[in-house]
Image (spheres, grey):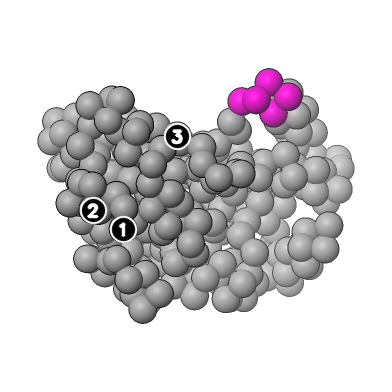
Amino acid sequence: MLEIVRIPVLSDNYVWLVHEAQSGETLVVDPAVAAPVLAEAEARGWTITQIWNTHWHPDHVGGNAEIKAASGCIITGPAAEAERISTLDVLVRGGDVVQLGDVRATVIDVPAHTAGHIAYHFESAHAAFVGDTLFAMGCGRLFEGTAAQMYDNMRKLEALGDDTAIYCAHEYTLSNARFAVTVEPDNVDLTRRFAEVVAARERGDATVPTTIALERATNPFMRATSVEQLAVRRAAKDAA
């Protein structure tokens, strides 16, 4: 239904290129920069028609203008951050529906990393693009929000279902895993995953996307049982 391509850029960012073959539409999620994205689309013979932004940070919107100039694409992003993303054409909020061809995605409000952060959930494709809210074994820093908001975000994303693939925007997994095993040293699933991540990174392999099932088993922030516990863990990770 959807062909999803990972494009590594900068030091640890991932830009996602999403192609819907029936319509021929191609979507870019959170383009930090333009050149590698345009090159990948051209190599595949895909025409970029849309950009979806999850939040305003420059390493998620930096390629917007150049990709729009090259392709004429439509740019969608969080209404709450419209003043900080000058290139937006379409403003969306939680509960809104956006489409790539005939494939529908629901917008989910996930504030905390930034005040207006959103995610996009393709229910029929079992895929969600979550920006800097949920990472493999981690969550975003609380730059503009609270632990209570992030705890609520974990519940919203957890409810998407175990088989949902989570496309986050950074390769932070090894650092997150090193912290996670200090939080839950007796978690057998986590110990096993840590070893797998170390091996993958030694090979130079990417470790995302992840899944809700994996995060429910091994992510100390999704596994936090209270707002207070998440807050303590986030503060400890920030200080690590």
Count of all numbered marks drawn on residues in the image: 3
| Residue 233 shown in magenta | no
Left or right: 190 in relation to 48: right
Q: Main secondary structure of the magenta part?
A: helix
Q: 31 or 34, which is in the foreground?
A: 34
Which residue type carries mark 2? Ala
Q: Is residue 111 positioned above or below 38 on the image?
A: below
Q: 48 or 159, which is in the foreground?
A: 48
Q: Secondary structure at mark 3?
A: strand
The region drawn magenta spans 201-205
How many neighbours does mark 3 have within 10 angstroms: few (below 14), some (14-19), or many (20 or more)? some
Disc 3/disc 2 C-alpha distance (Å):
22 Å
Which residue type carries mark 1? Ala
Which residue type carries mark 3? Arg
Camera sees residue 232 = yes
In the picture of the structure, the residue carrying the numbered disc 3 is 6
